[in-house]
Amino acid sequence: MSGPIMAVTPKLSLVLPDFGGGGAERIMVTLANAFAARGFDTTMIAGQAKGPCLADLSAGVRLLDLDVPRFGRAIPALVRHFRTDRPDAVLSALTHANLATLVAARLARGAPRIVVAEHNSITMMLASGSRAKRAAKRALARLLYPRAACVTFVSRAMQDEFAAALALPADRRRTIYNPLPLGHLRDMAATPPRHPWLRDRTTPVLVAAGRLAPQKDFPTLLRAFALLAQTSPARLVIFGEGPDRPALQAQVNDLGLGARVSLPGFVPSLPVELAAADLFVLSSRWEGLPGVLLESLAVGTPVVATDCPTGPDEILEQGRWGRLVPVGDAPALAEAIRESLARPLPPASDAMLARFDTDHIIDQYLSVLLPPSPATGPSRLAGADI
């Protein structure tokens, strides 16, 4: 008589270029930590194990550092990982890592189930490099993405963009929102902020955050703030680092705003600073689903955002929870900031924020990574605890 059937712990691997301080990296670390906490055998594979988000990776997650300067060079190591470690499913994020993971899966026999996640509008995929490089990237994505078991997107509008551009089959794409640890964020909101302007509540303080790069369009925000500053004593803090820092600092000086605009760099606990702000402003040209906008709403801070592709309109429900303005329109942005300081919109409801609940989002990712089957049943979603 045979003995009882022992449950086998599913192996999950997550792939990303590095641990930079962007939203996609934070989300992947959150997912890896959550999978490990649920009992899955979890490995995080990084092109380079460096960046501010690395410190947040749980000790329960195995780290595989490929130590490659460009992710295309990671393909041989990914093939070895698929053949030797034999994960049950792989989740990759960001376009270069997604393409390399899909190529490696084609080269490895008996490759695992591959799910690739896009975290930005297709505008970003086509925004960098020469025309030839952009065309090649689009052609590769059009060839490889339909071969993934599933492609996930962080907003419905973003899914529609990619589906049209890359001819993705309907049964191989899905929208899964960014996870929002609502309770943790609200606990953080009680912590005193680091920035001295946010500790001084006598003057209104606006906060913006993100990589100092063209996507975030901080030059338009600075022009809008210069208009606001003509009639308001408000100050502006822009958290983040990136290649545009020298140009932004020069613009601040040229506008005569040196005493009223601060560029303090990356901050590890951004929600603490957001909670102390009078208003959060998102000035982006494009996004996927801006997590910092959600975090601001979660801690009760009013928001203004550009109606960029994609995400802000979907989060704010066409302006119900925050004012939306056209991309690149400094006067409109200044007016929306002025109105929001004078007459804030009602705070986001718990029902609205519940759409982004972390446990709910984790379940959705697991449902595409380890879909129930007659052989495994729904227990695969529960890791080793079942």
Image (cartoon, grey):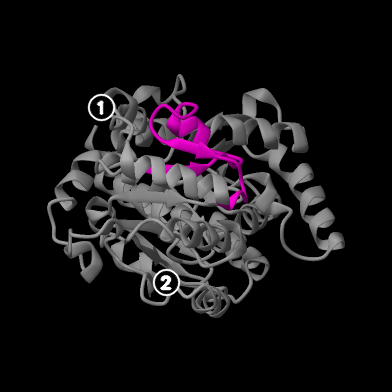
What residue type is disc 1 on? Asp
Mark 1 nearby-residue class (10 Å; few <14, some 14–19, many ≥20): few
In the depicted structure, whether residue 339 falls above or below residue 1: below
Image quarter for residue 145?
top right
Tell me if residue 286 is in the magenta stretch: no
Report if residue 11 is visible in the image: no
Magenta segment: 303-330
Amino acid beneath label 2: Gly
Q: Which residue has dot 2 on it? A: 51
Farthest-out residue, top: 374
Residue linked to disc 1 = 350
Quadrant position of residue 250? bottom right
Q: Quadrant of residue 43?
A: bottom left
Q: Residue at x 28, y 40 (%)?
A: 298
Q: Considering the image in quadrants, where does the C terminus appear?
A: top left
User: How far across and how far down the image is residue 283, in percent?
Assistant: 52, 52
In this image, 49 relative to 81: left or right?
left
